[in-house]
Image: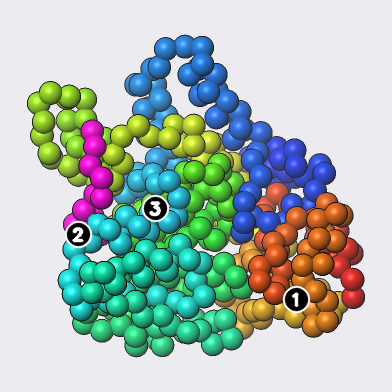
């Protein structure tokens, strides 16, 4: 039977004390996630290291992440975080003076700085300025030309929650350039089907909607990207003969494992795997439906209480689990402090507040937030 929201909620001790509505920032850990990491740490403390055992589990997690993203395990590589995943692309492609990258203004810096740093190689960064917080695929495509190597976007904008139609974007921009996606505000909350979306590279840290620990993440490397992307660091795990320490053979593994150099973060990988298992048990269609339902309650009721939404979705497909808002007269920092004192956890970002409920949250959590906000 699928894992219900109430059953998942029972696995989050923090839910007993707080209305935790801040998954676009840092998610709390469920008991199975911590327990899985504790098992590794206990074994590492009390028993000899068993490489074959942990490698089997690492392989299982890779498969489960692939299942979550509707792709094969051979396309999945583990990364430290979203930034390191995007940095892998920025550092690993062959760039030429005069190339350009097209991105979006007001993106989270993780999806700006790696591309901005390419100016030392003569690569231009072109930023699309959205209108009313929305991204128009056709207008974004018009920024691309024959020298555009990468189109770098977020599946969901971190500040206002706008959800981008990746399939429509690919149709608008054509076969080139390479489509690189920061999915940290989508993976674990919204369904991602890489069999349908023509994405070349996608990455996400585990610490937000994936409900995993900090310091680990995953990336999808599509066939076209695999052909063009050089590993930035090559180690024993990158090559086929990864257990041969004296007869050197620089033949890379044929799949995305070539981007993992050595000494993987086993506790992080296993913790992320436990979190992904929870999401798969719930079922991503059910997770997305519940996340959007709770977020829609906020989008419906906040304006009735005098609050302004930073994004009013014009189409259902634009919605995500992020709801950002402000009051025309009240100071956001004061509201944020007041909510924190009441045990309600959301984010303060610049001059607005951001709520981001997950599958295990309840209507009582939403009620608690709404009732604590002054009108």
* Rendered image quadrant of residue 300: bottom right
Q: Few, some or many C-alpha atoms within 10 Å of disc 2 (few <14, some 14-19, many ≥20)?
A: few
Residue 132's label in the rendered image is none
Instruction: Please state the extent of the stretch shown in magenta in the rendering.
Output: 224-236
Residue visible at 43% across and 82% down in the picture: 128
Which type of secondary structure does the marked residue at label 1 adopt? strand
Which residue is identified by label 2? Answer: 228
Asked whether 64 or 158 is in front, the reply is 158
Q: Quadrant of the C terminus?
A: bottom right
Q: Few, some or many C-alpha atoms within 10 Å of disc 1 (few <14, some 14-19, many ≥20)?
A: many
Which residue is identified by label 3? Answer: 84
Residue visible at 20% across and 67% down in the picture: 95
* Rendered image quadrant of residue 260: top left
Total marks placed: 3
Q: Earlier in the sequence, mark 1 or mark 2?
A: 2
Which type of secondary structure does the marked residue at label 3 adopt? helix
Q: Earlier in the sequence, mark 3 or mark 1?
A: 3
Task: Judge whether residue 286 can be spotted in this image.
Answer: no
Q: Quadrant of the N terminus?
A: top right
Q: Is residue 254 left or right of residue 347?
A: left
Mark 3–mark 1 distance (CA, rounded to whole Å): 32 Å
Determine if the magenta segment contains residue 40.
no
Mark 1–mark 2 distance (CA, rounded to whole Å): 44 Å
Mark 2–mark 3 distance (CA, rounded to whole Å): 18 Å
> Is residue 271 shown above or below 90?
above
Which residue is identified by label 1? Answer: 326
Q: Is residue 266 left or right of residue 148?
A: right
Residue visible at 89% across and 64% down in the picture: 371
Q: Earlier in the sequence, mark 2 or mark 3?
A: 3
Give coordinates of residue 209: x percent, y percent.
58, 53
Asked whether 76 or 112 is in front, the reply is 112
Asked whether 133 or 224 is in front, the reply is 133
């Amino acid at each position: 039977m699928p894992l219900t929201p109430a059953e998942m909620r029972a696995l989050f001790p923090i839910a007993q004390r707080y209305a935790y509505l801040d998954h676009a920032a840092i998610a709390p850990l469920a008991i199975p996630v911590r327990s899985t990491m504790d098992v590794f740490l206990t074994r590492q403390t009390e028993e000899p290291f068993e490489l074959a055992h942990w490698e089997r589990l690492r392989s299982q997690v890779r498969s489960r992440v692939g299942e979550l993203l509707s792709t094969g395990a051979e396309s999945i590589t583990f990364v430290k975080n979203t930034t390191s995943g995007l940095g892998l692309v920025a550092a690993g492609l062959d760039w030429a003076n005069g190339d350009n990258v097209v991105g979006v203004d007001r993106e989270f810096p993780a999806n700006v700085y790696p591309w901005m740093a390419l100016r030392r190689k003569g690569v231009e960064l072109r930023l699309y300025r959205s209108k009313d917080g929305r991204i128009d695929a056709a207008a974004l495509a018009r920024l691309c030309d024959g020298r555009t190597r990468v189109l770098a976007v977020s599946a969901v904008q971190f500040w206002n929650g706008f959800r981008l139609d990746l399939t429509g974007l690919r149709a608008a921009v054509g076969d080139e350039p390479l489509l690189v996606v920061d999915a940290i505000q989508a993976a674990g909350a919204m369904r991602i089907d890489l069999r349908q979306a023509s994405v070349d590279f996608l990455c996400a840290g585990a610490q937000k909607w994936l409900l995993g620990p900090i310091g680990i993440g995953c990336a999808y490397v599509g066939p076209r990207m695999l052909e063009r992307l050089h590993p930035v660091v090559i180690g024993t795990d990158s090559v086929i003969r990864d257990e041969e320490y004296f007869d050197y053979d620089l033949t890379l593994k044929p799949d995305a494992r070539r981007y993992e150099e050595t000494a993987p973060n086993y506790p992080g990988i296993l913790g992320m795997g436990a979190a992904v298992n929870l999401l798969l048990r719930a079922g991503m269609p059910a997770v997305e439906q519940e996340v959007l339902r709770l977020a829609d309650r906020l989008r419906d009721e906040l304006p009735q209480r005098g609050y302004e939404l930073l994004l009013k979705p014009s189409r259902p497909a634009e919605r995500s689990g992020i709801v950002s808002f402000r009051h025309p007269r009240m100071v956001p920092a004061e509201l944020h402090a007041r909510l924190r004192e009441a045990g309600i956890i959301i984010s303060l970002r610049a001059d607005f507040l951001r709520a981001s409920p997950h599958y295990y949250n309840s209507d009582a959590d939403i009620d608690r937030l709404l009732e604590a906000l002054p009108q």
